[in-house]
Amino acid sequence: MIYPLLTKELTSSDKLLKPDLSQKSGRELLAFYLQTKIKQLISFDKKYERPVIIEVRPNFISNFAKRLINTPDKRLLIGITGASASGKSTICSQIQRITQDLKMPVSILSTDNYFKDISVLINKFGSFDNLRDSGYDIDSPDGFQLDVLYDDLENLSLGNDIMSPKYLPNGTGVSVPKAVPVKAEKITIIEGTATLFEGIKDIFDIKIYVEAQDELRKKRFMQRASSERNQDPENALKHWNYLITTGEKYILPTRKEADIVINGDADLEYISQIIEYLHVITNSFQ
């Protein structure tokens, strides 16, 4: 997979002297170095049988480099979105595992915890499914506490730890305020369908959209509905059809906002190797 690039970096005797990041000239040198290495990675990925990267916005790499140069003290926020069962949560779980193994300073936050409390409505209609069938659009931007999410992200970007809400995934629609501690690490990854909604998207330094074929997404969703949520097939299919509609209405349009579009059916081991490579090129200095 990516081991040729990793081996080259780890065994090379021609390493960059660690730049002085307190000086703009040092940050410019680091930005140029990272641009070169990331372009090499993208070129390598294109040749792989199952590439991770589908698209990269033309000016993304140069714009990101400017961000590193001009605002070095701001913590890095990475937003990851995609339609239901596209693979974003699975990929983020893999990222969390490998970054913990490498002791990388990364926190992960889910926008699913920012759903509004709809417990009163669920009690009124008798169940979550009845509320959905009544026409209530649970997954619309109006269904999220976007103001709370934005404030929390702003605090994380400034280096302030937060307590995020916790939405209970048990069908009750209950949201518990300030229930989950999130540490303001150097990098925070925020994943979920609300990530690139209007009013939120511009706070991110890197915006990623995860894409997968509908057939694969449906297979994943139906398996999850049975094994994790104990849903009967008829109700699961009804909810899948609802998610297809809301995905096309709210999530798919955010694809155009993404800096990078990645493959939701990518090899997770290969993704781990990419993370390891990024770790090496940002820490391998003389």
Image: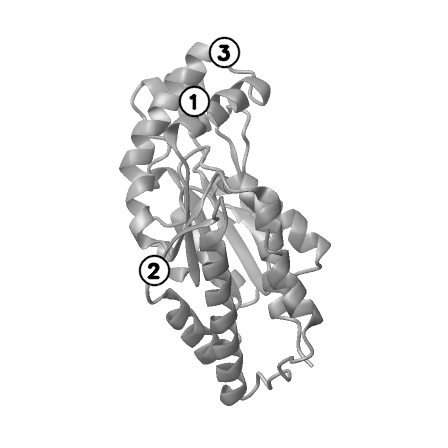
Mark seen at residue 57 = 2
Q: Nearer the viewer, residue 223 or 273?
A: 273
State how far apart marks 3 and 2 are (Cα).
Answer: 41 Å
Separation of residues labelled 1 and 3 (CA atoms)? 19 Å
Give the x, y percent position of residue 68. Answer: 48, 74
> Could you say which disc has been placed on residue 232 in the image?
3
Say what secondary structure mark 1 lies in.
helix
Residue beneath disc 1: 122
Is the C-beta separation of discs 1 and 2 under 8 Å?
A: no
Q: Nearer the viewer, mark 1 or mark 2?
A: 2
Q: Which residue: 33% across, 37% down? A: 140
Q: Position of residue 212 (x, y in %)?
A: 41, 37
* Quarter of the image where one finds residue 183: bottom right
Q: Name the secondary structure under disc 3.
A: loop
Q: Quadrant of the C terminus?
A: bottom right
Distance of mark 1 from mark 2, alpha carbons? 42 Å
Which residue appears at 44% of the width and 79% of the height?
Answer: 70
